[in-house]
Each structure stands twice: as C-alpha cells, then as structure tokens.
C-alpha cells in the first residue's frame, strides 16, 4: 500500500533513513596525556562553555583511535557536559573527522577550481590507478585511503595533496604522486615534502 | 609599492619573535597602549580600512558598533581562509605570525576585549604549529597575557582549530563553531557586535585586516589612505592562481589594475595560450572577461565592472578551460559545503550541480540552460547568509558570458573544448 498516490510503496527505497549508524568501536577512555591536553584546552574557554572544546576533543579521539567511534564520542560528551547526540551532530558536520576506519595514510587531493586547473583530476586518477581503489575507498592492506578535498588554500602550488589532515605535498603530478605512494610505504610521513613557505630547511 | 605586510616573508626565520622585534615589531602595540581606546577606533575609521575577508566593510565602523556596555567583549579573528582561490592569510600567518598577534592586541585594546580567539581552519595545521610556538614566545616575553608591557593591560590570544567547513568563514557561523556547534549562520540582527560569541559583543575580523593595524597606528590614517584609490586605502594582498606563469601572493596598492596583476606580477598566461576568463575575488564572484581587466583592483572599481573584489583570489583561466566544466567544478564545491540550514541553498545547490552534470556529460537539453538561470535566481538573495548568492554565481555568470558553450554541449552531446590537464574521466567522488 501507499500513503501517497505518486509514491510507490517500496521500503527499500523510501522508508529507510539514510543516516548511517556509527561504528561502536572499542571501549574508550582518553590516555592520561590526551586527557591532560584536553583539560588544558578547557582553560582557554569560559568555565560554563566547555562545549567550545568539542572539536579539539574529537581530534584527540581521532588521534587515539584513527577515526571517531561512538564510544569515543560518548566519552567526550561525558567530559564536556553534552549529550552523545550533540557530539555526533558536530562530528558529522566537519569533513576532517573520519566516521569509519581509514587507512594509516589518508591522501586528500584538493579538487576545487585552481587545483583542478593545474591538473588535480589527473593526480586523482593516477593515485586511484596506482592504489587500485576509487575515491573514498581504502586499499586492502589498510595502508592508504584516497579522498578528494575542497580548496586547501594553497592555490599557487596547485595541485595540493594533504596527508592525514596535516602534511602537505605541493605541485603534485601523476608521476610525483606515484612516487609519493612508494616513498610513504618506505619512509612514512617523513616522505611528504611540506609547505613551500617554510624556507628554513 | 614597497610591501608592508609581506616585506620579510621570504627571509629565513621571519616568523620568529627575535626577527620581528628587530624590524619594529610590537611598536604599534606600544603606541596603541598609550592611546585612549576610542581614539584608536577613530584612527581606524579615519584610515578607511575595509575588511579584507570579502565584504569590504569598514573596520572602524564595525568596532564602533560593538556594544561597550556589556562585558566581556571578544575579538574573533577569522583565519578560516577557505574561499577557493584565496591563500593570502596562509602566508601572513605562517611567515609573519607576530604581526597578526599585534593586530589582535590592538583590536582588543580598541574595543575593550580581554580575549582574542583566532579561528584557524583545520587544514592549516602546519601553520597552527608555528602560531602556537610563536604565541608561547610572545607570552614568555610579556607581549601577550597578564600586564602587557607593564601597562596593566591583560589580554589573551587563543588559537582554535576548525575541522573542515567552508561555511565557518561566515562570521556568525564562525561564532557557532567556536561555541562547539555546527558551523551554521545565525539570523541577523542581532549582529555579532551586539550578541556574538557566548552572546557577548564580538568583533569578527579577517587576518589581513588585523595585520594592517600596526602600520596604521605607526604611520597614521593619511598615510594609509594615500596608498590606494579613494576609500580603498592601504596595501592589499592579491592571490593569483590558475593558468598563469608565476602564481602567488602579491602585495600591491589597489590602484594596480587587474591586468597588471595577471600579466606583470603573475607573469602572464602560460606559454602558447590565451586568456579566456578571470574570477577576480574568489570563486563566489562573477567572471570578468579579458577586455574588462583595465580597472584598478579595488573594492569599488571591481564592483563597478560587475563583479566583486571579495577575498582578492584571482583565478585565471585560459582557452583550454570549458566553462560548463568550471561551473560544475564549483557547484560541486558549493553543494558539498552548504551547511544545510536554508532550503534554497541546500536543495538548489544540489539541483544546479545535477543540471550542470547533465549538460557537461552531454545529456542535457536546451531548456536545462534556462532552468539553471531560474534555479540560480531562486537561491540568490533568499538565504540567511551570502553563501546562497555565492553558490548561484558560478552557474549564472558562466551562462551569462558563455551561453554558446552550454548550447554546444547540448547540441554536440559532448565537451568540445580540448584541454591538456583534465582527466579522461572526471573523478568527482566521495569525500
């Protein structure tokens, strides 16, 4: 039966929420060091505004677990006097939080106009071919995840690839990225060249 | 014009406190602390300094509006530089962080704030590390914190990391994000100057705006206005990217023409190609054509030419750029970044992207082109923040100037613009 003349009753298509369930993960508690970092962070905001530290707290969960788990978010909620739903509400809004398990190295290729004009599409294509995965996937070894990201704010060094939310590989080419994958396999994050504005090295 | 904000950025260790102090660092702060706060506001008003984040609103006026009766008051520095094509604050913060701290302190003194929050985008973590290390040095030497320089003025600076949301660059959304919520805009009024962060009076200022303050205090309002055209005074950072030989950040007067910025400063179009279109102020503003570039790159002149200076992110495209593809690329950005609060932007952005995808992949119909215009016009001006206008602009401006290309896509059933940098399959995928 249908409640609407134009809408065919099809539980598989219409009557299902698109909201994905969070991964429960391991039972979670911050390590003593991370809890100290969070406590220090809380001193930067008014004492009745603990919630301001939620992004920082979620970064710490992600650092500890590799991604955001439901148990990690509940732990944060308890510390910051928020409900778990409020923490999930925030966590699912921001793209730098991973809601499922990702590879040890997350390659985030900037795809917005300036990087695209500089050949970002070919970079993504090359990385996709090299790793044998599509954008949004993790390779079977669990080493790499390939993502597309929006403007990273370094358009003069297009295209830019960010690794693990912080390391920068600039002026990427299909060849340099293929090499980057090999170098990361051999040397880890140290293989990523960094931001050109750093002229000291 | 001799660079003022970026004079030393290419020198080794330009980011350190020692280097900064050797080059008149914190002199502006010292002078400010000897002035009455209201005189600082009057000085900035007289200088005509306009916000460098995109809107070009006079900074002094913004500060004047801050409700001086309510306590506490805040400065929120917008370092969420996310407008596609913009990368100026990146340079300032990474290479000249103390200039920003000094600007924050001057702002706090002027409006009577005791804390400045610098909201930096999550992707700039390598920049944040430098800011944090240098901020610690500034605290140690008494430039920030309690009893600054022995004057009894207390002021803290806090660096707050975002987590990847373009919308957090909108001032009320930035405040929401600082409060630990989704970065979604608020209904205005009340404006942040009355009820901002934690419902207290707040001035939200861009990084480059604050960085101009020390020089204004040191050299005066007249000097500042003399640097640019009327009502567009001071130095300005321009970011040139895309199909130019030497992309980069260039500091210049706003008397400089767009053509000079593209052809002299950025070295012109790459060899063997010719200019097709320019987006002069970040991806949210209308396109200018090659014959419209002989105008000063000032807020007012670019507006007169039918676009906006915005964040001064100049994106240059040569003849290998398909305009249907460019609009599609940007609409993917806007549909992805829409915060979802207002229906026209949340749904309309997605519709525009779907229609553009249809046309780009050769499956469009002629009526789709007018449909784009119709949907675009029903987003612009119908949302809480300027994001709606920004999202509609790439579709509307490309159809306006390059309608023939859209028609060719529909007629031929494929893209007819050959390019040497696009992939054989457009890998727009999941984030």
Image (tube, coloured by chain):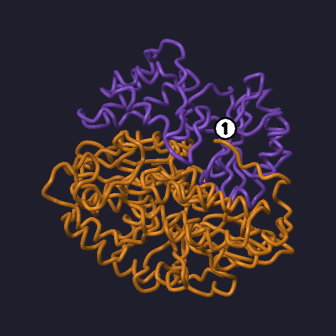
Chain colours: A purple, B orange
Q: Looking at the picture, how far across and down is residue B219, in whole percent?
A: 36, 74
Residue found at the very far left of the displayed protein: B69
In this rendering, position of residue B164 left or right of residue A181: left
Q: Quadrant location of residue B417? A: bottom right
Q: Looking at the picture, how far across and down is residue B257, in whole percent?
A: 60, 83
Is the C terminus of chain B in the top left, top right, bottom left or bottom right quadrant?
top right
| Point 76% across, 75% down: residue | B407
| Point 43% across, 29% down: residue | A57
Q: Which chain's residue wears label 1?
A: A
Q: Which residue is at the front of the view, B9 or B383?
A: B383
In this rendering, position of residue B247 left or right of residue B172: right
Relative height, residue B313 to residue A35 (above, below): below
Q: Quadrant location of residue B370? A: bottom right
Relative height, residue B308 to residue A142 (above, below): below
In this rendering, position of residue B394 left or right of residue B423: left
Q: Name the residue beneath numbered marker 1.
A: A163
| Point 80% across, 26% down: residue | A186
Q: Looking at the picture, how far across and down is residue A124, in whole percent?
A: 77, 46
Q: Looking at the picture, how far across and down is residue A25, in whole percent?
A: 54, 17
Is the N terminus of chain B in the top left, top right, bottom left or bottom right quadrant?
bottom right
Q: Which residue is at the front of the view, B214 or B116?
A: B116
């Amino acid at each position: 039966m249908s409640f609407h003349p134009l809408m065919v009753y099809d539980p598989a298509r219409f009557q299902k929420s698109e909201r994905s369930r969070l991964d429960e993960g391991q039972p979670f508690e911050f390590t003593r060091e991370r809890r100290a970092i969070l406590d220090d962070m809380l001193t930067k905001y008014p004492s009745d505004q603990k919630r301001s530290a939620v992004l920082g707290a979620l970064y710490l969960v992600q650092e500890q677990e590799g991604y955001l788990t439901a148990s990690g978010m509940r732990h944060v909620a308890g510390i910051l006097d928020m409900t778990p739903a409020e923490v999930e509400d925030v966590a699912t809004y921001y793209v730098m939080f991973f809601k499922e398990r990702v590879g040890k190295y997350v390659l985030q290729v900037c795809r917005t106009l300036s990087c695209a004009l500089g050949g970002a599409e070919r970079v993504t294509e090359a990385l996709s071919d090299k790793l044998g995965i599509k954008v949004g996937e993790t390779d079977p070894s669990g080493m790499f995840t390939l993502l597309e990201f929006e403007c990273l704010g370094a358009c003069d060094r297009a295209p830019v690839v960010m690794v693990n939310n912080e390391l920068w590989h600039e002026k990427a080419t299909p060849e340099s990225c293929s090499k980057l994958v090999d170098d990361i396999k051999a040397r880890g994050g140290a293989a990523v060249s960094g931001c050109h504005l750093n002229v000291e090295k | 014009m001799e660079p003022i904000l970026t004079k030393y950025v290419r020198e080794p260790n330009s980011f350190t406190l020692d280097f900064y102090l050797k080059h008149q660092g914190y002199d502006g702060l010292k002078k400010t602390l000897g002035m009455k706060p209201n005189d600082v506001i009057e000085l900035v008003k007289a200088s005509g300094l306009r916000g460098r984040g995109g809107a070009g609103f006079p900074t002094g006026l913004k500060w004047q509006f801050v409700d001086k009766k309510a306590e506490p008051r805040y400065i929120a520095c917008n370092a969420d530089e996310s407008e596609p094509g913009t990368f100026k604050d990146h340079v300032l913060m990474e290479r000249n962080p103390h200039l920003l701290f000094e600007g924050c302190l001057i702002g706090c003194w002027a409006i009577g704030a005791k804390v400045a929050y610098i909201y930096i985008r999550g992707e700039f973590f390598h920049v944040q590390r430098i800011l944090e290390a240098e901020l610690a040095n500034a605290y140690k030497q008494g430039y920030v914190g309690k009893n600054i320089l022995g004057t009894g003025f207390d002021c803290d600076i806090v660096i707050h990391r975002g987590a990847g949301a373009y919308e957090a660059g909108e001032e009320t959304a930035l405040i929401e994000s600082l409060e630990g919520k989704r970065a979604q805009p608020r209904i205005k009024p009340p404006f942040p100057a009355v009820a901002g962060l934690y419902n207290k009076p707040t001035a939200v200022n861009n990084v480059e705006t604050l960085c101009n303050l020390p020089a204004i205090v040191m050299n005066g309002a007249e000097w500042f206005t003399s640097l640019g055209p009327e009502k567009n005074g001071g130095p300005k950072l321009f970011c040139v990217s895309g199909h130019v030989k030497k992309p980069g950040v260039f500091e210049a007067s706003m008397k400089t023409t767009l053509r000079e910025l593209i052809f002299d400063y950025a070295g012109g179009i790459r060899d063997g190609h010719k200019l097709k279109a320019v987006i002069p102020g970040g991806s949210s503003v209308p396109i200018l054509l090659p014959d419209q570039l002989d105008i000063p790159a000032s807020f007012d002149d670019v507006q007169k030419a039918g676009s906006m200076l915005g964040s001064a992110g100049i994106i240059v495209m040569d003849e290998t750029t398909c305009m249907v593809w460019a609009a599609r690329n940007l609409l993917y950005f806007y549909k992805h970044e829409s915060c979802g609060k207002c229906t026209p932007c949340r749904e309309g952005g997605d519709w525009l992207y779907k229609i553009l995808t249809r046309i780009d992949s050769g499956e469009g119909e002629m009526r789709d082109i007018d449909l784009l215009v119709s949907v675009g016009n029903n987003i612009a001006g119908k949302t809480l923040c300027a994001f709606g206008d920004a999202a509609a602009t790439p579709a509307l401006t490309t159809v306006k100037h390059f309608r023939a290309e859209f028609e060719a896509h529909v007629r031929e059933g494929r893209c007819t613009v050959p390019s040497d940098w696009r992939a054989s399959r457009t890998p727009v995928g999941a984030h």
